[in-house]
């Protein structure tokens, strides 16, 4: 006879548990960690490099670079900018998970790190489902992607702490309806903190850096 | 898109509970999947047939309990089902909305055969 076994468990429960462990470790070392998500080409790496350029002296950043293929182009750019980078090759997977991030954390000297940026795989769907153990989720949305993205990819906007609107230097050349875009964001994540920047020119970075420093200081207080 | 990782995770949970309950075979698995969870059930089924091979959950039937996305307007308290694209409140046009259902992504229960049942079935 068939027997029914009640489970009622989230399918990604084991990932969530590993994410909890990562979080504990980060807290123990007082490292403020940010999960950076975006579609391919939104400018994640350029954004990180520009962030490094604008950091005050002495603030130590480490970057975990998630890539689907074993190319170190992004990690090399971070290293060239003078910060530590660990590359994770996801072997074709469309997202980072808590296990991969845990392995990368083992390779970092967290004692010598003030904050961590985890560059997720370029994708607007999958990374939203996998917790990593970071403190803040940010999404980089760029002007050329179009103003309808919140309506098409609602999931990723919902659990954000910060939205970066990147490539604003291109606004004069494209039909991007900022009001329509912002209205979609407001529906999904009322009051979301947003920073409009150009990672190319550095415009708008001051406010973002201030936010970042405040968070890092709070974690270390 | 990430259904392979998800299906592997599902298999691990199923096998854990099946073993704890001394199952010899898992026949059915019932899942609740919210419309906002971005999981495609056909895709989970496809991967399932591969990842469950040579386990006690091989050939188990997957049943999907689809849960529609339900929103509540924070201004006029109207509740409505989201069909596909995100829309403002149909009653008052407000964009202050709260998701109250549709994000579920869980395994509800499994149905198993115990060792003695199986023996009985094969000997009779």
Image (spheres, coloured by chain):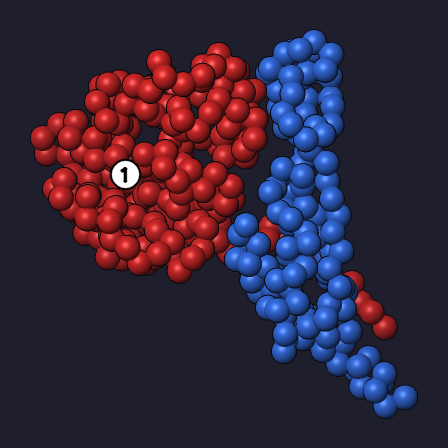
Chain colours: A red, B blue
Q: Position of residue A70 (x, y in %)?
A: 31, 58
Q: Position of residue A107 (x, y in %)?
A: 24, 57
Question: Image quadrant of residue A153?
Answer: top right
Residue at screen point 73% across, 75% down:
B25
Residue furthest to the top = B92
Question: Image quadrant of residue A43?
Answer: top left
- Assign the N terminus of chain A to one quadrant of the image: bottom right
Tell me, yes or no, if residue A95 can be seen here.
yes
Question: Image quadrant of residue B22?
Answer: bottom right
Q: Position of residue B1 (x, y in %)?
A: 54, 50
Residue at screen point 73% across, 12% down:
B91
Q: Nearer the viewer, residue A101 or A182?
A: A182
Residue at screen point 76% across, 56% down:
B63
Q: Secondary structure at mark 1?
A: helix
Q: Position of residue B88 (x, y in %)?
A: 64, 17
Q: Nearer the viewer, residue A150 or A171?
A: A171
Q: In the picture shown, does residue A204 fall above or below A116?
A: above
Residue at screen point 68% across, 25% down:
B71
Please name the residue that numbered disc 1 is placed on: A45
- Assign the C terminus of chain A to one quadrant of the image: top left
Q: In the picture shown, does residue A172 fall above or below A128?
A: above
Residue furthest to the bottom = B123
Residue furthest to the right = B124
Provide the chain ID for the residue under circle 1. Answer: A
Position of B58 with respect to A146 (left or right) is right
Tell me, yes or no, if residue A28 can be seen here.
no
Position of A138 with respect to B117 (left or right) is left
Residue furthest to the left = A57
């Amino acid at each position: 006879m068939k027997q029914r076994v009640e489970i009622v468990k989230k399918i990604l429960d084991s990932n969530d548990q590993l994410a909890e462990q990562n979080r504990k470790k980060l807290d123990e070392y007082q490292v403020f960690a940010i999960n950076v998500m975006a579609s391919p080409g939104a400018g994640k790496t350029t954004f990180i490099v520009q962030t490094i350029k604008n950091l005050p002296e002495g603030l130590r950043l480490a970057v975990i670079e998630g890539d689907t293929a074993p190319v170190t182009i992004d990690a090399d750019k971070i290293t060239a900018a003078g910060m530590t980078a660990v590359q994770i090759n996801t072997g074709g997977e469309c997202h980072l998970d808590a296990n991969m991030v845990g392995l990368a954390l083992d390779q970092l000297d967290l004692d010598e790190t003030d904050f961590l940026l985890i560059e997720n795989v370029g994708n607007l769907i999958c990374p939203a489902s996998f917790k990593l153990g970071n403190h803040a989720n940010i999404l980089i949305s760029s002007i050329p992607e179009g103003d309808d993205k919140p309506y098409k990819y609602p999931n990723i906007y919902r659990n954000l702490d910060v939205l970066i609107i990147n490539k604003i230097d291109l606004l004069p050349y494209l039909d991007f309806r900022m009001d329509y875009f912002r209205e979609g964001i407001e529906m999904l994540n009322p009051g979301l903190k947003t920073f409009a920047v150009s990672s190319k020119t550095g415009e708008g970075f001051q406010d973002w850096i201030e936010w970042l420093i405040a968070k890092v200081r709070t974690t270390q207080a | 898109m990430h259904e392979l990782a998800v299906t592997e995770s599902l298999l691990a949970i199923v096998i854990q509970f099946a073993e704890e309950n001394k199952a010899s075979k898992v026949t059915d698995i019932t899942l609740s999947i919210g419309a906002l969870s971005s999981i495609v059930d056909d895709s989970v089924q496809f991967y399932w047939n591969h990842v469950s091979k040579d386990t006690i959950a091989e050939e188990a039937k997957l049943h999907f309990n689809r849960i529609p996305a339900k929103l509540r307007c924070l201004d006029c308290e109207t509740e409505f089902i989201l069909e596909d694209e995100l829309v403002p409140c149909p009653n008052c046009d407000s964009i202050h909305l709260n998701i109250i259902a549709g994000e579920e992504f869980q395994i509800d229960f499994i149905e198993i055969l115990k060792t003695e049942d199986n023996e009985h079935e094969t000997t009779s």
